[in-house]
Image: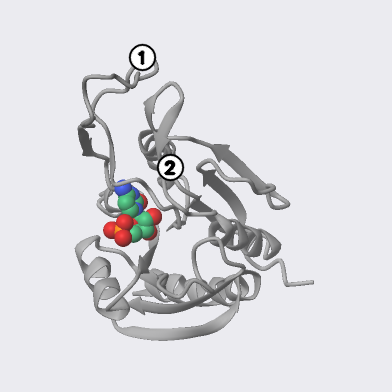
Amino acid sequence: APRRDLAHLNVVITAGPTREAIDPVRYISNHSSGKMGFALADAFAERGAKVTLIAGPVNLPTPRNVTRIDVVSAQQMYQQAMQSAVENHIFIGCAAVADYRLEQIATQKIKKTADNDELTLKLVKNPDIITNVAQLREKRPFVVGFAAETQNVAEYAKDKLQRKNLDMICANDVSDSALGFNSEHNALQLFWQNGAESLPQDTKRNLSAQLVEKIIARYNQSSVD
Ligand code: C5P
């Protein structure tokens, strides 16, 4: 059994997709399974950390000793995340948050009409959750982001690290269907302000245990800086 050496730490993790309603029966979403975020929550809890998991709609059991908050939309995830962020030492944004939502959710099912072959949906931008957490002036947690990329993985990830003012970013290449979305496996490239490290392909469970080590090392470093 792993050491329960992180009992002093509160960690909040967002995971899974968000779902943006179109009407009472339809929605826009993405292929995130939530597996990486759930595996990471489990790994932190096994080390004794107090873990809050803010989960979008996923089909996964709650890891042992983890407090789960279920949400559906990006706006709901944003509200829960901002509340939790100031109560936690570490914020990890694993969720694949929808970048846009419907400007207006139809209150009744949208009907197919005989006279119109086109339907236009107007979308508006969702808040960027992790950017807002990283901008906190008081009680800002240590902020870790994820980046799912299909090309130029390192370049785009480093750009996000700077632009979103993150303390660390974990990038994965989702163009390889054996890794990332819905897979049991992943491989990560980690970047922080003055360094980088690669975690080679492994199960999400094993990667999570290693990632906890790496995050804690950077977190401990940042609190002495
Ligand atoms: O810009 P992109 O979505 O690729 O950045 C990914 C990172 O930003 C992830 O950590 C993700 O959880 C976070 N994010 C967020 N809120 C959004 C969009 C992305 O927290 N609206």
Is residue 125 visible in the rendered structure shown here? yes
Is the CB of mark 2 within 8 Å of ligand 1?
Answer: no
Q: Which residue is mark 1?
A: 107
- In this view, the residue farthest toward the top is 108
- Residue 134 screen position, x and y as percent: 29, 55
Front position among marks 1 and 2: 1
- In this view, the residue farthest toward the right is 1
For the rendered model, the colour scheme is one colour
Looking at the image, residue 140 sits to the left or right of residue 137; the answer is right
Q: Quadrant of residue 121?
A: top left
Q: Which residue is mark 2?
A: 18
Q: What amino acid is found at the position of numbered circle 1 in the picture?
A: Thr
Question: Which element type, helix, strand or loop, lies under badge 2?
Answer: loop
- Residue 199 screen position, x and y as percent: 50, 83
Looking at the image, residue 138 sits to the left or right of residue 14; the answer is left
On-image quarter of the N terminus: bottom right
- Name the residue at 30% across, 64% down: 166
Front residue (pair 12, 174): 174
Across the whole image, how many numbered discs are drawn on residues? Answer: 2
Looking at the image, residue 8 sits to the left or right of residue 115; the answer is right
Q: What amino acid is found at the position of numbered circle 2 in the picture?
A: Thr
Question: Which element type, helix, strand or loop, lies under badge 1?
Answer: loop
- Name the residue at 41% across, 34% down: 27
- Name the residue at 36% across, 14% down: 107
Q: Residues within 10 Å of mark 1 (few under 14, many from 20)?
A: few
- Name the residue at 29% across, 46% down: 99
- Residue 47 screen position, x and y as percent: 67, 65
Indicate which quadrant contains ligand 1.
bottom left
Looking at the image, residue 185 sits to the left or right of residue 191; the answer is right
Say which label, 1 or 2, has the lower sequence index: 2
- Residue 61 screen position, x and y as percent: 69, 48
